[in-house]
Amino acid sequence: MTPAEIISVVEERFAGAIAAKKADAMDPWVSIEPSRLVEVCLFLRDGPRLRFELLNCISGVDYLEPEPKKAAKAGFEPHTEVVYHLQSFTHRHRFTLKVILPRWKDYQPGQLPEVPSVANVWATADWHEREVYDLSGVWFTGHPNLTRILLAEDWEGYPLRKDYEYPLEYHGIRCR
Amino acid sequence: MGWLEGRWEEGFVTTTLERAINWARESSLWPMTFGLACCAIEMMATGGPRYDIDRFGAGAFRATPRQADLMIVAGTVNHKMAARVRRLYNQMPDPKFVIAMGACTCGGGPYYKYGYNVVKGVDLVVPVDVYVPGCPPRPEALLEGLMRIQDKVRAMKDLTKGQPMDIPIPHRSGAALLPEEVATPEKANEFAVKNKDLARPAKA
């Protein structure tokens, strides 16, 4: 199926769940309301015409221009995206899902934005979600074991956020 | 050996015990099998037949720190690894030497500015004897570093470097029962700072 067909199939089934779409991008994508992500993913995996058996990766993207002078020209409002790249071996097609979130839950700094976990849909998502949580600071509700995967357990902050402050010291070791 | 020279038959050598021990020691420096990143590939090449670190008696890569004299820190050390590096160093028997191999271990290297998780030089974690710069260093450079270690061994006056028994401080996790003075990370830090001078290597 072409990306446009996939988008129309998803739109037909989940009319209210689609927040935005872009069919002419290099990777055509639709963005999904976080509350309905799991059912959309189940449909994408099990729908006979779709059969997305493989989740290639989950990426966390932080849209923020920390410099106030450049922020006006940045061309986007500050927000966080979680991007899911899907692939089907049966039908040999690809698709991209996005979930667009505020940078902090309820715009309260320190409160992580929440997305339902898809670890029960694709087992691959388990570690990918841990990595996104570790580096970008997105909380996946319903994840079986959401702990840091790369950094130490007691690390503070989320390093791939644009406003991350580098630590000066970690357990007695100077950091700069 | 001055007046003792030439008093015995041929093939009989006189020397001091110190020099004999140092000679034996420098000719069989056993490194630890310990590669962290891409520098380890170069270290393996140095151990292979083309560069052949065995020529210097340092080819017996030991799989345990308790049998090793030399720690070649080959590769980027990050904060999660730093505690383990220190622990392995603590487990080595006393006359122990450290080569910091590569730009990352010498001072952070390419990760100096934006590497949020990279230790800016392994000398912040363990005392380093010889720095081998390069990204990664050629095997010849590592062999040169090894020869400088051998120079240090040859010049040693004492049998040991006089380093105190160092208590391993696991700061991250694990259910080890620790002595009172290192029970919490804060106390452990204080203890390490207080005993910093003792942990420094004696001038070889």
Image (tube, grey):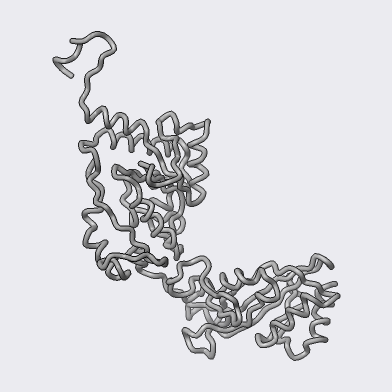
> What's the residue at 28%, 55% (across, down)?
B166
In this view, B198 is above or below A123? above
In-image side of A112 versus A167 (left or right): right
- Residue closest to the eye, A141 or A73: A141
Where is residue A115? Give x, y as percent: 61, 82
Whether residue A75 is visible to the viewer of this picture, yes or no, is no
Name the outermost residue toward the front.
Answer: B177
Where is residue B59? Give x, y as percent: 44, 35
> What's the residue at 67%, 70% (across, down)?
A123
In this view, B9 is above or below B100? above
Where is residue A30? Give x, y as percent: 73, 80
In this view, A12 is above or below B75? below
Give the total of numbered labels: 0
In-image side of A63 versus B13 (left or right): right
**The C terminus of chain B is located in which quarter?**
top left
In-image side of B33 versus B66 (left or right): right
Name the outermost residue toward the left.
Answer: B3
- Residue closest to the eye, A175 or A133: A133
Whether residue B35 is visible to the viewer of this picture, yes or no, is yes
In this view, B141 is above or below B115? above
Name the outermost residue toward the top.
Answer: B9
> What's the residue at 20%, 36% (across, down)?
B157
Where is residue B56? Give x, y as percent: 40, 30
**The N terminus of chain B is located in which quarter?**
top left
- Residue closest to the eye, A135 or B183: B183
- Residue closest to the eye, A158 or A49: A49
